[in-house]
Amino acid sequence: MIVRAALTLYLAASGRATGQDRAAGRDQPSPVAVAAALGYYGGRVAPVARLDRRAARRTAAPTGRRRMYILVVTIDIKPEHREAFIEAMLEDARGSRENEPGCVRFDVIQDETNPNRIYLYEVYRDRAAFEAHLQTPHFLKWQATVKDWFASPPVVGRGTNLYPPDEAWA
């Protein structure tokens, strides 16, 4: 299981299909495979298989150092709602950057080949700052506004930074 998840994550990150994807006629990993490898399923973050102790020591943050809490989100929007979604998303992003001291970065990115696909790159000082974000008026407004505009459930990757170090973030 650990090897399969690691291989799927590696292949997904490098844009290469798994054997199961190729058997299904796909030349890239399926969103489900990527989401599963990242530990995301059904709106919940599942625990990802534990690494061996040596690998954990190699990637562990120095003692006393907190890591940023980071989300990478892929959102597919219904075409008829694209412009309104982008407007609402930019309002939420601006609110996050301007009103949340724990929000370090909030990028809204439109896919180069699919204008209905939006990527979010969100960086928070820590998990508590992200949890506070979920209670802000601008986020609650965004959530209520766009809830019916998704073409499919968003795919969310969550993690912490290895590089750059926290002190390098603006």
Image (cartoon, helix red, strand yellow):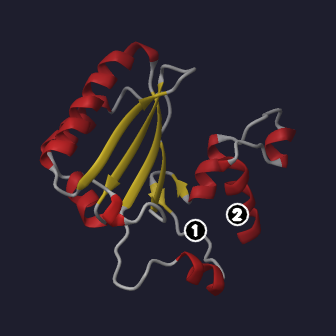
Q: Position of residue 43 (x, y in %)?
A: 45, 52
Q: Where 110 falls versus 22 (above or below)?
A: above
Image-quadrant location for residue 92: top left
Q: Which residue is mark 1?
A: 48
Q: CA gap, disc 2 to disc 1?
A: 10 Å
Residue found 36% across the figure and 63% down from its top = 68
Of badges 2 and 1, nearer the viewer stands 2
Dot 2 surroundings within 10 Å: few (below 14), some, or many (20 or more)? Answer: some
Dot 1 surroundings within 10 Å: few (below 14), some, or many (20 or more)? Answer: some
Q: Is residue 1 visible?
A: no
How many marks overall?
Answer: 2
Are discs 2 and 1 less than 8 Å apart at CB? no
Image-quadrant location for residue 4: bottom right
Q: Position of residue 141 (x, y in %)?
A: 18, 36
Query: Which amino acid type is marked by label 2?
Result: Ala
| Mark 1, secondary structure of its residue | loop
Indicate left or right for 12 with 126 as reference: right
Query: Which amino acid type is marked by label 1?
Result: Val
| Label ID, residue 106 | none
Q: Which residue is mark 2?
A: 6
Residue positioned most to the front: 168
Residue found 79% across the figure and 48% down from its top = 18
Q: Position of residue 104 (x, y in %)?
A: 27, 52
Indicate left or right for 61 with 47 as reference: left
Mark 2 vs 1, N-terminal side:
2
Q: Where 78 falls versus 54 (above or below)?
A: above
